[in-house]
Amino acid sequence: MQDKVDKITSLIDKHLKDELSEVENGELDLWLSESDRNRTWFEQINDRVTLTQKLVEFAGIDKESVWQKTVDLINADGHVIRMHPRKAVWKKYVAAAAVLLVSASAWFYFGQGKSTEAAKAPIVSNQLNNKIVPGGDKATLLLADNSTIDLENSGNGIVAQQGNMSVSKVDGQVIYKQQGAGSVQLANLYNRITTPKGGKHKVTLPDGTKVWLNAASSLRFPIVFAGKERSVQLTGEAYFEVASLNAEGQKIPFKVDILSSAGKPGGKVEVFGTHFNIMAYDDEAAIEATLLEGSVKVTGPNTNGKDRGTFIKPGQQAQLENGQIEIVKVIAADVASWKDGYFPAKNLEAVLRQIARWYDVKIRIEGNIPETSLEGSKIRRDMAFEDVLKALGSFNLRTRMEGNTLIIIN
């Protein structure tokens, strides 16, 4: 059997590289004609989405060996594995992945047995709600006069005019643009952009700062930044690219006050110009401020001016919990990967909370969640919910659906 496995592995490898001879092509055709199982496997190897899913599934069998070896093979040039690589490089990726994957899982595809791990974690998706779909560009904009704008259903163009500040929507983002000099009156007026569960949105603030809001989040900000600081208030999660200067060309601090959904202070982040991510959901154990570029100062809540703050460097994360700040090293780009369409690679329980917010479902856990890290995996946020369930099953989670509730039954 092993000789046959090696032979088929070699043929598939050559097929993916367009290196099959006429004789070898005939051998591959003969093997494909032997059974529907063989042809199904071959078709899956040729499909980029299915292959990537198989890599995730088999990562659950032996994460320390199979997954890492796969990453090493595919990712040898330092690039991130993409679910939809450019066509020009796809064959390079898939060929490397196929060789390892066929070898590592031959016992499964050639009928030598079934994965005991997979047997532990069947996907039970009865009563799957077809209305459960990935999130999208959904948000509500609350203006200074308390009127609201549904950004999901607004067309591109100017959606509001507040004094000499125009507010436009352009392809999933809101842009503030000042016409002429600002005014003290406008500086005392605030707007708020809020995303629901299953929503996200991007906003360019009056000073040029860009903010990506994740699901179930809110950002409050003045129509015009004036005075000695630029101050905004955040609940939920957002990624910031802060303009180093304000609209008048002045270098003044940019401060993010972190609040709970009930308005309770959670801490403060102060910067001049930098890229960072803040995650501050009420159902998370800690507030996380992660720095990708520049320098930020993180201050705990209720310090009454006595706390001088803690500075973090790129690749560091400040975790605020119970008034204490702990600094840890992280892969900062992974933390902020949600804005690029991926679920950040954290532990399973944290990812489940992200899935709940993004697909707007409830989650009930009946049992224990394995202490499993998704580091190295890339689960896209545009996947159909059924495919998300399959991905969870590959990490040994047994699930079932009851209406809009995903039940983990480990």
Image: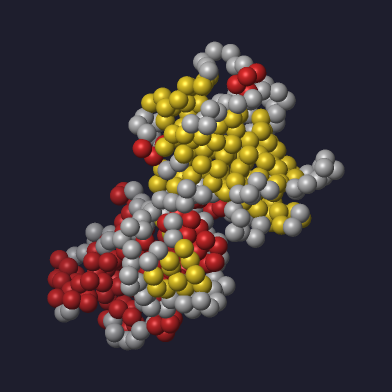
The image quadrant where one finds the N terminus is bottom left
Q: Nearer the viewer, residue 28 or 20?
A: 28
Q: Nearer the viewer, residue 361 or 267?
A: 361
Name the residue rendered at 42%, 84% in the picture: 116
Choose top left, top right, bottom left or bottom right for residue 107.
bottom left
Report the residue that reaches farthest toward the right. 306
- The structure's colour scheme is secondary structure
Name the residue rendered at 78%, 47% in the picture: 302
Choose top left, top right, bottom left or bottom right for residue 401.
bottom left
User: Height in image: 304 above or below 64?
Assistant: above
Report the residue that reaches farthest toward the top. 180
Q: From this viewpoint, is residue 347 visible?
A: yes
> Residue 125 at what x, y percent from top left?
35, 72
**Left or right, 192 with reference to 286:** left
Name the residue rendered at 70%, 29% in the picture: 229
> Residue 39 at what x, y percent from top left?
20, 72
Name the residue rendered at 65%, 60% in the picture: 285
**Left or right, 245 with reference to 337:** right
> Residue 26 at what x, y percent from top left?
14, 71
User: Height in image: 47 above or below 145?
Assistant: below
Q: From this viewpoint, is residue 295 visible?
A: no
Q: Nearer the viewer, residue 378 or 25?
A: 378
Choose top left, top right, bottom left or bottom right for residue 70.
bottom left
**Left or right, 222 with reference to 407:** right
Report the residue that reaches farthest toward the front. 146
User: Height in image: 104 above or below 195?
Assistant: below
> Residue 219 at what x, y percent from top left?
57, 39
